Amino acid sequence: MKIASWNVNSIKARLANVVDWLKQAEPDVVCLQEIKTVDETFPSEAFEDLGYNVAVHGQKAYNGVALLSKRPLEDVRRGLPGDRQDDQARFIDALIPTDRAPVRVASLYLPNGNPRDSEKFPYKLKWMDRLIAHAKSLLEQEEEFVLAGDYNVIPTSDDVYDAKAWADDALFVYETRAKFYTLSHLGLTDAFRVRHAEPHLYTFWDYQRGAWPKDHGLRIDHLLLSPQATDRLGDCDVDAYVRGWQKPSDHVPIWCVLDE
C-alpha cells in the first residue's frame, strides 16, 4: 500500500498538478495539506473520478487537510484532540483496511510558528504537545498508524541547505526540534531516513530567491510510523521532480510503501 503526503498550497491552484501526479504515481492513500478551502468547495469529484474516496477537514483561505484513498475510509476523525477551542483545520485521520491489519493514517499540518515573538510560536509548541499526547494514546491502543504531513520542523542540520541561516527560525530552533525528538522517541520511525541516510534531501523549496534551481531546500514533510507499520516498511522517497512543473506547490510529495 503506497501512502503519500503533499502540502499542495491551495488545491484550487494546484488541482491539475495533483491529478497529473496521481495518474503517474498511483498512490493508494494521499494526505493533503494546505488545501485552503472549505469542505463544500473541495473538488472531490476530480478525485472520485480517479477511484478515490475522499474525506476533508477544510477551512476558508487557510490551512485545511484531506485524505484520498482507493480503499474505504473508516472511522474518520477531524481535529487533533486536546483543545476544543482550536478551530484551525490542521488534522484528519481515518482507519484504512489492508490485507493484514488496518492502518490509521493521519494528514496533519503543523503550525509554522513564525514570528517567534508572536502568539504563533507558543501555539505551535502546544500543538506539538497535543500531537505527542495523541501519538501516546495510539501507541497504548496498539494501533498501526502513519502520521503524515507538513510538520514545519527541520529535524537536523542535514535537513536544511544552510543551518546558520535558519538558526533562529521557528522551524529549526531548539524548542521545536526537542518536541519533534520527543515525538519520535515514543517509538516512531522517520520513514524517509530509514531509506535515505544521505544529507541534504528536501521536500520544500521556497518560491523566493531562486531556491529550487539552487537546491536551497528544507526537509519539513515527514512520515512517522508506529512500530507495527515500520515492520511493514518497504520503499520510501520524495517526488522532487514535481517542483519543476508549471505553477508548482513549494512542497513536493513524499511517500512510503507498506507491505501487505
Image (cartoon, rainbow, N blue to C red):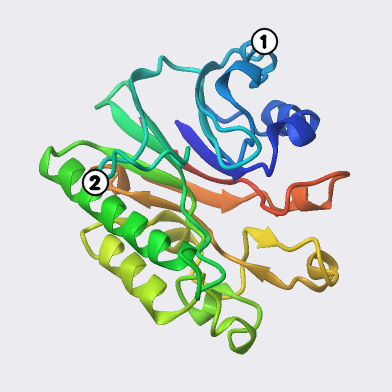
* Place of residue 94 in the rendered image (x, y in percent of width and height, measured from the top left): 36, 26
Give above or below for 41 relative to 123.
above
SS for callout 1: loop
Amino acid at circle 2:
His
Residue drawn at the location 26% of the way across and 67% of the way down = 182
The image quadrant where one finds the N terminus is top left
* Place of residue 87 in the rendered image (x, y in percent of width and height, measured from the top left): 42, 38
Give above or below for 82 relative to 220.
above
* Place of residue 135 in the rendered image (x, y in percent of width and height, measured from the top left): 24, 48
Residue drawn at the location 55% of the way across and 73% of the way down = 159
Name the residue nearer the viewer: 251 or 59: 59
Disc 1 or 2, which lies upstream in sequence?
Answer: 1
Name the residue nearer the viewer: 131 or 48: 131
| Image position of 258 (left or right of 230) | right
Give above or below for 95 relative to 149.
above
Give above or below for 81 relative to 132.
above
SS for callout 2: helix
Q: CA distance from mark 1 to mark 2?
A: 34 Å
The image quadrant where one finds the C terminus is top left
Name the residue nearer the viewer: 169 or 194: 169
Q: Which residue is mark 1?
A: 49
Which mark lies nearer to you, 1 or 2?
2
* Place of residue 107 in the rendered image (x, y in percent of width and height, measured from the top left): 45, 39
Q: Quadrant of residue 8?
A: top right
Q: Which residue is mark 2?
A: 134
Res. 228 in view: yes
Q: Residues within 10 Å of mark 1 (few under 14, many from 20)?
A: few
Residue drawn at the location 66% of the way across and 19% of the way down = 41
Amino acid at circle 1:
Asp
